[in-house]
Image (cartoon, rainbow, N blue to C red):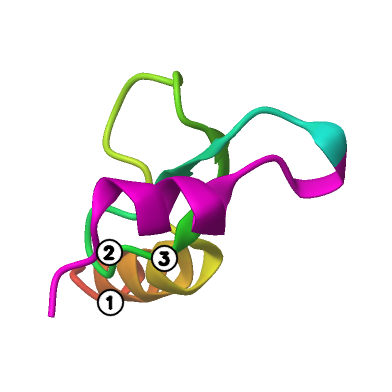
Amino acid sequence: MPSTDDERTDRTADRAGGPPFADCVHCGEPTEHPADRPGALLCPHCEWLEAQRSACSG
């Protein structure tokens, strides 16, 4: 079930008083990056998976 914009805003709203955080482009979980940062942003878990894939692709 897709989340609504309100749920996403509540979930990613300022952790420790900071800006809202962007959602991961793979799984939709909050990333460690602000929402206004350009590019395809990944959560720590998906970043790790992507690093493993690229490290083994020889």
Provide the secondary structure element on which disc 3 rests. Answer: loop
Mark 2 Cα shell of 10 Å, populated few (<14), some (14-19), many (≥20): few
* Residue at image point 86% right, 44% down: 16
Q: Position of residue 11 (x, y in %)?
A: 53, 59
Residue 6 against residue 39 in the figure, above or below: below
Q: Which of 6 and 32 is in front in this view?
A: 6
What is the CA distance from the residue labelled 3 to the residue labelled 1? 25 Å
- Location of mark 1 (residue): 56
In the image, residue 33 above or below residue 55: above
Q: Which mark is residue 29?
A: 3
Q: Which mark is residue 54?
A: 2
Answer few, some or many: residues within 10 Å of disc 3's Cα (few below 14, many 20 plus, some between 14 and 19).
Answer: some
Q: Magenta stretch: give its range.
A: 1-16
How far across and down, in percent of the image, does residue 57 sit? 18, 70
Residue 47 is situated, as x and y percent measured from the top left of the image, at: 43, 62
SS for callout 1? loop
Q: What is the magenta segment's predominant secondary structure?
A: helix
Q: Which residue is drawn at 53% across and 53% down?
A: 10
Residue type (three-letter) at the residue carrying disc 3:
Glu
Q: Are marks 2 and 1 in contact (CB under 8 Å)?
A: yes
State the CA–CA distance, disc 2 to disc 3.
21 Å
